[in-house]
Image: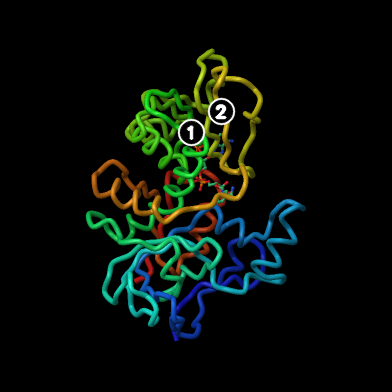
Amino acid sequence: MVKAVVCAKYGPPEVLQLREVEDPAPKRDEVCIRIFATAVTSSDCIVRSGDVNRVLWLPMRVAVGFRAPRRPLGMVLAGDVASVGEEVTSFKPGDQVFGFDRFGFGAYAEFKCMSGRGLLAPKPSNVSYEEAAAVPYGGLLALHYLKQGAIRDGQKVLVYGASGAVGTSAVQLARHFGANVTGVCSTANLELVESLGAGAVIDYTREDFLTRGDLYDLIFDAVPAVHRTVRLRGTGGLTPTGKYISVTDGSPKLHIEDLTLLTELTEAGRLRPVIDRTYPLEQIVEAHRYVDTGHKKGNVVITVR
Ligand SMILES: NC(=O)c1ccc[n+]([C@@H]2O[C@H](COP(=O)([O-])OP(=O)(O)OC[C@H]3O[C@@H](n4cnc5c(N)ncnc54)[C@H](OP(=O)(O)O)[C@@H]3O)[C@@H](O)[C@H]2O)c1
């Protein structure tokens, strides 16, 4: 038996329970990972609460479970390969890996199996397991949306919600693509966002960025829908060919090439994992309470062992 966090029913953080579950064994095409660190993402909190809009309610219950999620929660992992199924050739026991299993879950656990063809890649060699766990979620989503926004060298990009998991990645990745970045966040996070490479930072608690009259080629709204207090789409701030893109647009298709790029950028020191707090697996309820506030700085990481 191994330890895992299960969600006994949809609801507040207190529905999470650390339990003993069956030892997972890899199927033919699967990799079994001994997890050292995971992260509590905004998406984990949405799944736990079960609180989604009417359009998503039924598809989510069908996919995840009607009374409660069928599997232990957790989408992000960093660890070692414990064993592999007979068809897996790209990983072997002992490999250090990190990854993202958005629909498979099960990463709040000591062990987890996932497809060897999923979003699983060699862990950046220069960072700890905890730091590695702070990379895939924000990094993959930010890459997806910046590419959707056709980001290019020399563009003026504004990241709204620049201090969260997606936002801290977006600021750094936009810089990597050669953009001039303006980050928007609250007073407490101005210094952090500037340290990630934003050329300008705007405190949304004191100023509406639109009143400056600056125009952007791309506005990326990375604020989770539940925490949004202003509507940015269609309100201006864009050049005539500028684009507005939101982290809630569509259902992003994430690519293994992007995870590999995140490994390379982390190893090159161009992408710094931002960790706000670290909790042991036993304090998963406290970790969820904190992420629910909508004001974490970057990522909340869970040490599993
Ligand atoms: N489209 C999809 O299928 C898909 C898939 C996966 C994830 N997602 C979405 O991706 C998002 C990920 O968010 P995250 O993990 O990066 O969130 P997070 O880490 O909690 O960060 C939240 C950010 O929002 C800012 N913020 C909070 N309240 C604000 C307000 N009232 N006004 C302006 N800014 C505010 C925070 O800044 P301050 O703390 O400085 O206020 C922070 O920068 C989630 O919404 C999730 O649903 C979408």
List x then y, in percent, for residue 299. Answer: 42, 50
Q: Nearer the viewer, residue 117 or 303?
A: 117
Residue 133 position by quadrant: bottom left
List x then y, in percent, for residue 31. Answer: 40, 74
Q: Are marks 2 and 1 in contact (CB under 8 Å)?
A: yes
Q: Residues within 10 Å of mark 1 (few under 14, many from 20)?
A: few
Q: Give the residue displayed 52% in from the left and 32% down from the top.
A: 160
List x then y, in percent, for residue 246. Answer: 58, 38
Residue 185 visible? The answer is no
Q: Which residue is mark 1?
A: 150
Numbered circles on residues, count: 2
Tag 1's secondary structure?
A: loop
Q: Amino acid at mark 1?
A: Ala
Q: Quadrant of the N terminus?
A: bottom left
Q: Nearer the viewer, residue 260 or 73?
A: 260
Q: Residues within 10 Å of mark 2 (few under 14, many from 20)?
A: many
Q: Nearer the viewer, mark 2 or mark 1?
A: 1
Residue 197 visible? The answer is yes
Q: Which residue is mark 2?
A: 243
Q: Nearer the viewer, residue 256 or 269?
A: 256
Whether the residue carrying mark 2 lies under 8 Å from ligand 1 is answered with no
List x then y, in percent, for residue 278. Answer: 38, 57
Q: Amino acid at mark 2?
A: Lys
Q: Earlier in the sequence, mark 2 or mark 1?
A: 1
CA gap between label 2 and label 1 equals 9 Å
Please state the quadrant of the image where ligand 1 appears.
top right
Residue 278 is left or right of residue 94, and the answer is right
Residue 305 position by quadrant: bottom left
Q: Give the residue displayed 72% in from the left and 70% down from the top.
A: 66
